[in-house]
Structure formats: structure tokens, C-alpha cells
Image: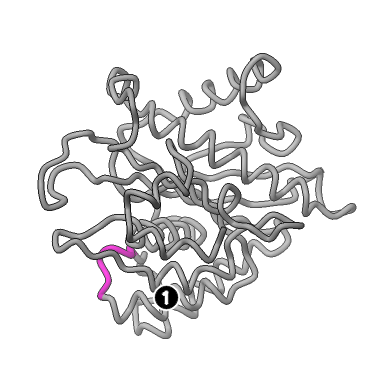
Amino acid sequence: MTASFTVYVDESGDEGFVFHPEERGSSRWLVLSAVVLRKQNDLLAVRLMRDIRTLLKKDAKKALHFREMRHEQRIPYVRAIGGAKLRTVSVLIHKPSISEPERFQSESFRLYRYASRLLLERVSWLCRDHHRQGEGDGTAEITFSNRSAMSYDDLRTYLGHLRESAESSDVRVDWNVVRPEQVRAINHDQLAGLQIADAVASGIYFAVNLNPYGEAEDRYLRLLAPTIYRHAKTRTAIGYGLKFWPDSFEALAEKLQHLEAFAPYK
């Protein structure tokens, strides 16, 4: 039986910890985002990107990179995503708040793998709670945007280790949905879904990461809001479609005033 869901993952920001004044140096935030579609709707991503290229008068075969676009192009781009039949999950890591950064500096990509764990936990809850009988086996095919220096065999091994140790740790991935062997990596320009994930991750990133003038851009967040995964009963997005780490959203918002933009999603 085939998978029930297709998931595309990309990130914005870096994993460095060298912070200089006026927001220079390493990014203060690392954002990892997933775009989740029902497997039967997977072609929606292709049609969506085709329509966006037409709207923006881009070449039909051109891969779009959100950071390379002008603000006036980004707005209709994320508005189109916000109106699409898909869901998004984002993990927002504020690196200056990590109490022991050396844990993540001692091994390449360790922070990225941990962010992937937090992301896939929430992706698995979303898929588990919205699986329809007769639509696949309940699992998700997960495609990461390829990072050339990173081993995705290591990521699959990491997920396999988490699965084996789940009973004795704090791992909350639903392994009936996430199977390490169904995780792969493909270059950004090869799949429409990865370009959508790039726009989501970058759009959320601009809402949390201050520019050198101390400003954040939350309009992308507001346009993407209809897609954000919410708890079925409480309708909160914080902790579900928007996961802040290492501190809670409330703790981070106390010291970072611009995070008020996320308050409506509590």
C-alpha cells in the first residue's frame, strides 16, 4: 500500500553561534519548515508553482528561491501558498537562548538533526490525526531539500536510533507515520514541493529574525497563517504548527518584543 501523505522540508538560517552586534555574524534563528499534502493531492504543488511562475512572469522551468526575490514578488507568492490545500509545520530555534551551545558545536549538523526531530514529531501528529481510511497506509513520504555537505544516511540512522529508543526517552514521533526508510533528500530545484517549503521556511524566518535595523517582517507569517497546523480542539498553533525552542513561546516573547506578531496563534 502506498503512503498517505507527502512531506517537503527546507530550512532558513544557519547553525552557527558567532553573534555580532547589529544582527551580524550567524543568524539568531534557525527555522525548519515542512509542507504536508495528502498523497493524492501531490500534483497540487506542481500546479501551484506553475501558477506562481505565471503570475510573477518567471520562466516555466525556473526554480524559485524566496531569498532572491523582491518583497513585492514574495507577497503574492506566499499569498498563493496561504490559500492552497496544504498544511505547514515550522520549528523556530532561537540559538542565543540555547544554554549549552557547545553540545551542538561539537558535531556537524547536530542542531539540524534535533530540529528535524521536533519537526517530524509534529508532522506525525498532523498526519496521524487526519488519516482517512482507504487513503494509503497512514505513512508519510518525507523529502528534505538536499544540503550538499550533509549525509542523509546519518539523518536516517539518527531517526532509526530515536525509533529504537523511543520507550526510554522523550521522543514523541508517531512511528506509524514516520519511517526512516521513507526519508530522502533531493535538490531544491527538482521538486515544486521543496520550493514551496523554501518559501514557508524563509517567510517564517523573516518574521522572527531581525534585520540590521532591528526590524522583522511579519506579513509573510500572516499570509501563511491559514496553512499552519493547529490542535484540533484548542485551535492553538503554538506548540503544534509553530514550535519554539529552547524556551517556550511565552518566555521568548518576554525578552523579544517583536514576537508579539505570533501572539494570535497561541
Q: Quadrant of the N terminus?
A: top right
* Magenta range: 65-70
Q: Residues within 10 Å of mark 1 (few under 14, many from 20)?
A: many
Residue at mark 1: 77
The answer to whether residue 72 is left or right of residue 232 is: left
Residue found at the far left of this picture: 21
The answer to whether residue 266 is left or right of residue 128 is: left
**Is 139 above or below relative to 132?**
above
Q: Residue at x 73, y 42 (%)?
A: 139
Q: Position of residue 34 (x, y in %)?
A: 53, 51
Q: Quadrant of the C terminus?
A: bottom right
Q: Residue at x 70, y 56 (%)?
A: 39
Q: Residue at x 56, y 66 (%)?
A: 45
Q: Nearer the viewer, residue 1 or 75?
A: 75
Q: Is residue 151 magenta?
A: no
**Is 205 above or below relative to 179?**
below
The answer to whether residue 55 is left or right of residue 258 is: right
**Is 164 above or below relative to 257?**
above
